[in-house]
Every structure is written in structure tokens, then in C-alpha cells.
Amino acid sequence: MANIKLICGHYGCGKTNLAINMALDTAKKGSPVILVDLDIVNPYFRSSDYADLIKNAGVRIIAPNFGHTNLDLPSLPAEIYSIFEFDGDVIIDVGGDDVGSTVLGRFSKQIESCGYQMLYVINKHRVMTASPEESVQMLHDIESACRLKATGIVNNSHLKQETTKQTILESIDYAKETAKQLCIPLLFTTAPRYLAKDLREIEYLYPIDVYVKTLWE
């Protein structure tokens, strides 16, 4: 039976980059893994934009059927239903906010029957999630749209290429308070791999590579 992990959060929180890292790390362990790009709302920063990297690592990718530009209207491929029969890890990159999460709601019953983890990715440095209270409200909207409940929080606070050690350290209390208000655990904090060696004091630190970048980075 599939081991399903849903990656959800506000637009720009870094969930796509996290989903790619998790898929690649799972593949390195020798486990079969599928990465599902379920974002049919935001035409930018999709997991499927990195298909060559993902496929070369031995990860199967299922993505919306876009045409040859980032602006074509997408549709979900029929093969998405195969994940519920898959014997391995399935990582689903969910569309941002409640609008994107509505797509996930189509599959809520199948996902519940398989069992799942839903990781809520937060970033202190994004509008609409800059405070614990805003982050809590955002998750309530997402859960209502997808008809599933988050099981844990990932602190992915960053400022893109301007991220420093202090950027991440200053986000820890914010992440802990968000988890406290939601009554779900803070699973881990991410940090770019080049900063991770200087952040060993953080409990449950997950070093990541930065694959998803803006055009001007």
C-alpha cells in the first residue's frame, strides 16, 4: 500500500522545493517513489518543471497535462489513480492555499482509505503567514478545501538567496507557537545545505538543496 505524504502550504512557502528534496532523498535510500505535481492553479514553480532532474534520480513523476507554455490550461492525468495501488512512497505537491487544495479534495476519500501524512509548510517571511495566527487561519482554509487534516508542521522559513543563519533561528519560536496553537507537532526545520553545519543547535534539522529558483536568481 502507498505511503502518502501531502505537502501543502501558502504560495511561495517553498513546498515544491521541499517535495523535490523529499522525493530525491527517498529514492537515494532505494525506495520506490512517485512525486505527484497536483498544482494546476499556479503555472510557476511546479515540481514538473524539474522533470529531468527527478526522473534521472529514479523518481516517477505524475503531473498535470500542460501544453508547451506556462499559461496553458491544465488537466489531471488519469494515471494519478494508480498511486493508490502503488507499493512505495507517494509525495504529493499540493497547489497553494485553499484554492489549490481544492484539487486535492477530489481524492480525499481514497487518500483517507490508504492513510496519509499531511505536512503543512510554513514560512515566517511570507505575507499571510507572517504570524502564528495567520498561519493557523491559512491551514484552516486549506483543510476545509481539501477535506483532510494536517498531521505535522514543517518550518521552511527563508528569504530565498538572502537566507542567513539568523533568518532561520529567528523563525523557531514562530514555528513552535504555530504548532502549539494547531495542536500538531513541529516535525522539522529546513535549512539550505550550505547553512546546515552552522545550525546544529536546532532539533530535527533537515538540510535541503535549493532547486526551485526565480528567473532572476
Image (spheres, rainbow, N blue to C red):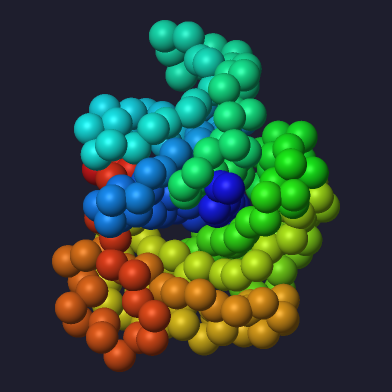
The one nearer the camera, 165 or 79, is 79
The one nearer the camera, 95 or 166, is 95
Q: Is residue 102 visible?
A: no
Q: How many marks?
A: 0
- Residue 29 lies left or right of residue 8; in this view the side is left
Q: Quadrant of the C terminus?
A: top left
Q: Is residue 80 visible?
A: yes
What residue occupies the far top of the structure in this picture? 68
- Residue 17 lies left or right of residue 71; in this view the side is left
Q: Does 217 sit above or below residue 117?
A: above
Q: Quadrant of residue 140?
A: bottom right
Q: Does 175 sit above or below residue 3?
A: below
Where is residue 150? Give x, y as percent.
68, 63
- Residue 115 lies left or right of residue 212; in this view the side is right
Q: Does 170 sit above or below residue 163?
A: below
Where is residue 76? Give x, y as percent.
62, 21
Q: Does 108 sit above or below residue 199?
A: above
The residue that appears at 44% across and 67% down in the rendered structure is 157
Where is residue 161? Give x, y as percent.
26, 56
Q: Quadrant of residue 197?
A: bottom left
Where is residue 84? Give x, y as percent.
62, 38
The one nearer the camera, 214 or 65, is 65
The residue that appears at 50% across and 26% down in the rendered structure is 63
The residue that appears at 43% across and 12% down in the rendered structure is 69
The residue that appears at 44% across and 39% down in the rendered structure is 34
